[in-house]
Image (spheres, rainbow, N blue to C red):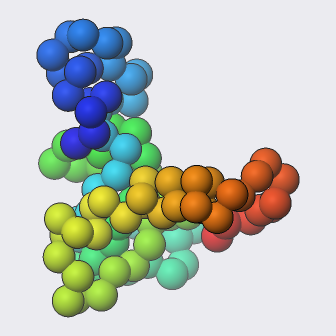
Amino acid sequence: MSEKDVLSALGIVDAPKAGLGLETAGVIRRTGPNVKDLRVGGRVILFGGGSFSTIVTTAGQLCAKIPDNLDFNDGATMPVSAIYCLINVGRLEKGQVTNLC
């Protein structure tokens, strides 16, 4: 849970329309017909609004497989940390990446 999520939960700032949370980790329970590289039972991290929930529905492109030896708590912090590093450490700029998946 991010600082903004805490402030939203306390009513200090408006909550996002999608709900609290931007990143999480978990086990896939179902997939859509166009999802080819993820399987039911697979462990994943994901990036998407409303992820502070017991059930999250998101696009397969926003999920990444994680190994069995990676703790869900550690995995759940990776998406935003990776984005932070790409922008602030790697100095990634608009237009440098055309396809992240």
Residue 44 lies left or right of residue 94; in this view the side is: left
Residue shown at 40%/39% (left/top)? 49
Residue 90 lies left or right of residue 76; in this view the side is: right
- Of residues 22 and 40, the one drawn nearer to the viewer in this rendering: 22
- Of residues 77 and 39, the one drawn nearer to the viewer in this rendering: 77
Q: Is residue 12 at least partly visible in the picture?
A: yes
Residue 73 image point, x, y percent: 17, 65
Residue shown at 34%/52% (left/top)? 23
Does 98 appear above or below 57? below
Residue 56 lies left or right of residue 63; in this view the side is: left
Residue 53 image point, x, y percent: 20, 43
Q: Is residue 33 at least partly visible in the picture?
A: no
Does 34 appear above or below 37? above
Does 25 appear above or below 58? below
Residue shown at 62%/54% (left/top)? 87
- Quadrant of the rendering where the N terminus is positioned: top left
User: Residue most toward the right?
Assistant: 95
Residue 85 lies left or right of residue 78; in this view the side is: right
Residue shown at 76%/52% (left/top)? 93
Residue 13 image point, x, y percent: 31, 12
- Quadrant of the rendering where the C terminus is positioned: bottom right
Does 83 appear above or below 30? above
- Of residues 53 and 5, the one drawn nearer to the viewer in this rendering: 5
User: Residue most toward the front?
Assistant: 89
